[in-house]
Image: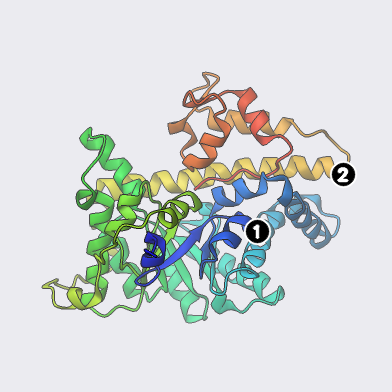
């Protein structure tokens, strides 16, 4: 019987499940799983996970000891950890949990948050080597990760778009990086006015290939995990990468196809390449970042999108907490949330204004017209209490 693409991929790459949905993780049985704000959002909107949301709020209420102003900040982190703890009961490997994006330019606060998240996992009986703390690949975030790694807290540097970010991460000794293949493709399609690229010429694929070869050539131990895929072609072109974090729908596509998969990335081949080493101090990093328009724009966009979503999440948790206490009815948060995302005030949220996960937007866009109305948002949220964005 012919092997599926997924079976073949698993012989050369660690396929990681990119979701917060425990059912999907159970189905594909990956070694590791990654979460991010939008994936936890999607999962938390499912009725079967309402207890996770309420459990996080109850835990936060107990910890706050009557100070209601502390409940939502505590619940934000607890919710991510709760999903992580449940995921780790399914996967044998690691789970990634993100630091609040609003701390992306604050090294000290990122270190403190990383230590706090790990303490929550350890209190839940999970050893720190099973958790990756996700941090945005700003210069400040990379410096925070360097400190955390020395504490034995392993990090996954995310929102990574440029070689300068990758080099700085490797020199800082981080455990893993997540270059965003699909978001790089998105930028080039818009900038160059193209609808598509041949698989091997996909700008996101080219970027990750260069990073992988650089790491293997120079013996860095930092793992490369391609992320944010738009199509199967990107995954096929990166077969052989250390890890690939893949959404459940694309994992299902890989599992259903049986053509031959050829390894494209190979450490032995990379070792024989002529790739000069590039030192990366702060001045070099900032100069390279300012000169890389794509990386600069996509990093800024990603941080802004995450931060905007966390503000919305706080409003939704505030409302849910008030509803649990009998102080209000669910509904106002959706109205407040809509105003945050409707940047031009025209009564619709476009895909560009949303700025987050396409899967979440598509689920809320009931008529498929590419924009969300207040009614669609309210219907999509329903009794759901969490909205975050990748």
Q: Is residue 327 visible in this depiction of the protein?
A: yes
Query: At which x and y percent is residue 164?
Result: 27, 62
| Residue farthest along the left direction in this orientation | 274
Which residue is at a point 26% across and 46% down the rendered structure image? 293
The structure's colour scheme is rainbow
- Give the position of the N terminus as an image quadrant: bottom left
From this view, report whether residue 210 is shown above or below residue 301. Answer: below
Nearest the camera: 284 or 358? 358
**Cα distance between the residues tagged 2 and 1:** 21 Å
Residue 77: mark: 1
The quarter of the displayed image where residue 337 is located:
top right
Q: Disc 2 or 1, which lies upstream in sequence?
A: 1
Provide residue 221's location: percent of width, then percent of height: 34, 79
Q: Looking at the rendered structure, which numbered label has been put on residue 162?
A: none
> Relative to residue 378, is residue 24 drawn left or right?
left
In the figure, is residue 1 to the left or right of 389? left
Q: Quadrant of residue 297?
A: top left
Q: Mark 2 Cα within 10 Å, few/some/many (few <14, many 20+)?
A: few
- Circle 1 packing at 10 Å, graded few (<14), some (14-19), many (20+), is many
Pointer 2 with pointer 1, Cβ within 8 A? no
Q: Nearer the viewer, residue 190 or 234?
A: 234
Question: In this orientation, does residue 280 appear?
Answer: no
Identify the residue at the far right of this view: 326
Residue 325's tag is 2
In this rendering, the answer to whether 141 lies above or below 173 is: above
Instruction: Using the image as rendered, state which of residue 63 and residue 10 is in the foreground.
Output: 10
Residue located 22% across and 56% down the image? 206
Which secondary structure, mark 2?
loop
Whole-percent x, y for residue 377 in the image: 62, 30
Which residue occupies the extreme top position in the image? 346
Secondary element type, mark 1: helix
């Amino acid at each position: 019987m012919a092997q599926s693409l997924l079976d073949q991929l698993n012989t050369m790459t660690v396929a990681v499940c990119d979701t917060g949905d425990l059912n999907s993780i159970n189905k594909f049985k990956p070694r590791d799983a990654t979460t991010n704000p939008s994936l936890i959002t999607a999962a938390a909107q499912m009725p079967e996970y309402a207890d996770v949301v309420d459990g996080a709020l109850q835990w936060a209420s107990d910890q706050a000891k009557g100070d209601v102003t502390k409940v939502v900040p505590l619940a934000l982190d607890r919710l991510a950890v709760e999903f992580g703890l449940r995921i780790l009961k399914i996967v044998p490997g690691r789970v990634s949990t993100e630091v609040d994006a609003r701390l992306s330019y604050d090294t000290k606060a990122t270190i403190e948050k990383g230590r706090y998240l790990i303490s929550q996992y350890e209190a839940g009986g999970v050893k720190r080597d099973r958790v990756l703390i996700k941090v945005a690949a700003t210069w400040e975030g990379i410096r925070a990760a360097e400190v955390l790694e020395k504490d034995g807290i392993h990090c996954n540097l995310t929102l990574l778009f440029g070689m300068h970010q990758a080099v700085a991460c490797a020199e800082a000794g981080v455990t893993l990086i997540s270059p965003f293949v699909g978001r790089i493709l998105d930028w080039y399609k818009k900038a160059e006015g193209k609808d598509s690229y041949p698989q091997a010429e996909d700008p996101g694929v080219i970027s990750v290939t260069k990073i992988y070869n650089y790491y293997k050539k120079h013996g860095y131990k930092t793992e490369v995990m391609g992320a944010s895929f738009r199509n199967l072609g990107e995954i096929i072109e990166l077969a052989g990468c250390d890890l690939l974090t893949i959404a459940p729908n694309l994992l299902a596509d890989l599992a259903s196809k049986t053509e031959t998969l050829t390894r494209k990335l190979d450490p032995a081949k990379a070792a024989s390449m002529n790739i000069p080493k590039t030192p990366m101090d702060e001045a070099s990093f900032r100069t390279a970042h300012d000169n890389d328009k794509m990386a600069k724009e996509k990093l800024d966009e990603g941080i802004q999108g995450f931060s905007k979503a966390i503000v919305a999440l706080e409003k939704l948790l505030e409302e849910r907490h008030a509803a649990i206490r009998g102080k209000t009815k669910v509904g106002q948060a959706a109205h407040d949330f809509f105003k945050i995302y409707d940047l031009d005030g025209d009564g619709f949220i476009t895909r560009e204004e949303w700025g987050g996960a396409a899967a979440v937007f598509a689920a809320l866009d009931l008529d498929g017209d590419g924009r969300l109305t207040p009614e669609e948002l309210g219907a999509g949220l329903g009794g759901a209490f969490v909205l975050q964005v990748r």
